[in-house]
Image (cartoon, rainbow, N blue to C red):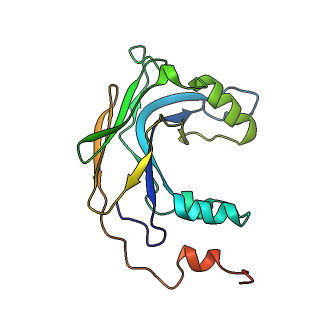
Amino acid sequence: MHFPSYGGDLQHEVELVVEVGLSAGQTDRSVEPMARAVTVGVDLTLRDVQADLKSRGLPWELAKAFDQSALVGDLVPLDDHIDLANIEFSCSVNGQLRQSGNSADMLFNFSELMVAIGAAWKLRDGDLVFTGTPAGVGTLQIGDRIRIDCDVTGAFEWQVVAPRRRSDRSPRAVGEIGDDG
């Protein structure tokens, strides 16, 4: 994955990820959305950009929604052998364990998350829901290898490489439009 072309403090957050599965034609928010598949993923955040935007009272989009900001492993369809309430997952960087968690320790279980999210936003078939991260969030540098492991889905690995060449329409330039300073 490419280091973003703006920002400097890139941090990882390993999370379980569920794929929404709705029945054909199901769109009513009163119907509980269901998880169809599960995987493990990495939610990336530019903390320095986030802090700057927060200090100016601006939305955090540029800190959370950049190219390759959500890395996901292969989805595994749910069946009777997968217990969503007991999934082990972890994140290592350059071979050193940084995060380790189990879905049993989540503040809200998958069903509660899906109902809460579905009440606020219209979930669509195939949407991916990131569920939250255990302690140990940390910084990534160019050259780092990030590996996520899950007892249900297996392991996935990426290397952080240099940024792509920055264009004239960079997110930083767009974020500065309208600044008075």
Query: Is 78 in front, or is 115?
Result: 115
Q: Tell me if 50 is positioned left or right of 1 in this view.
A: right
Instruction: Pinpoint residue 166: horizontal percent, then vertical percent.
Output: 43, 79
Q: Does residue 109 sit above or below 97 in this rendering?
A: above
Instruction: Pinpoint residue 63: horizontal percent, then vertical percent.
Output: 56, 61
Residue 65 in view of the camera = no
Query: Is 26 in front, or is 129?
Result: 129
Query: Is 49 in front, or is 115?
Result: 49
Residue occupying image coordinates x 52% and y 78%: 170
Instruction: Pinpoint residue 130: horizontal percent, then vertical percent.
Output: 53, 40
Q: Tell me if 36 is positioned left or right of 154 in this view.
A: right
Instruction: Pinpoint residue 69: horizontal percent, then vertical percent.
Output: 46, 56
Query: Is 59 in front, or is 40?
Result: 59
* Figure quadrant of the C terminus: bottom right
Residue occupying image coordinates x 45% and y 66%: 8
| Total marks placed | 0
Residue 151 placement: quadrant: top left
Q: Does residue 65 sit above or below 76 in this rendering?
A: below
* Figure quadrant of the N terminus: bottom left
Residue 147 placement: quadrant: top left
Q: Tell me if 56 is positioned left or right of 159 in this view.
A: right
Residue 14 placement: quadrant: top left
Residue occupying image coordinates x 44% and y 31%: 38
Residue 52 in view of the camera = yes
